Amino acid sequence: MSEQISLAEAAERIRRITEHHNSRTAKILREHGAKIEATAAVITPVDKGFLRRANTYHVDATVDAVMLTIENRMIYARYQHDYPHHHTQPQARDHFIALPFAAEIPSIVRDIVDADLKEATS
């Protein structure tokens, strides 16, 4: 059974959710960005190690949005990422950033929703 709350209490809960939402979300995205970067490193094709070490993430927070960017700063990364290759390393994969990113999305969403719900009910 759902709890009955007043309109004022509902407004207060929404205020609490939004007050620190961006900072909570940025923290969550940094945690998941590190996981994605670590997972991507394992499946990134190894040349001389430059490509693997060039995987990185960063979180940008503005008033309107919090964004997680996962990237590889090597100029040839897109060629290695987007096109099928026959890698000699057993763990290497094409789409070495997209695969771990997509796998992490459900956990990111769950963690953000859980953090907001916890704030609303505390």
Image (cartoon, rainbow, N blue to C red):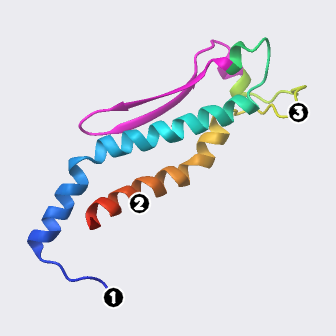
Residue type indicated by callout 2: Asp
- Against 81, is 10 above or below? below
Q: Earlier in the sequence, mark 1 or mark 2?
A: 1
Q: Is residue 27 above or below residue 42?
A: below
Magenta-colored span: 53-79
Q: Which residue is mark 3?
A: 90
Task: Determine the CA span between mark 3 and mark 1.
Answer: 52 Å
Residue identified by numbered label 2 = 114
Residue displayed at 20% across by 56% down:
16
What amino acid does circle 1 point to? Met
Image mark count = 3
Q: Residue at x 58, y 47 (%)?
A: 104
User: Residue 106, position in %: x, y?
Assistant: 54, 54
Q: In this figure, which residue is indicated by the disc labeled 1? A: 1
Magenta segment: does it hold 69? Answer: yes
Pinpoint residue 68: horizontal percent, then vertical percent.
45, 35
Identity of the residue furthest to the left in this view: 8
Which of the two residues, 50 or 34, is positioned nearer the viewer here?
34
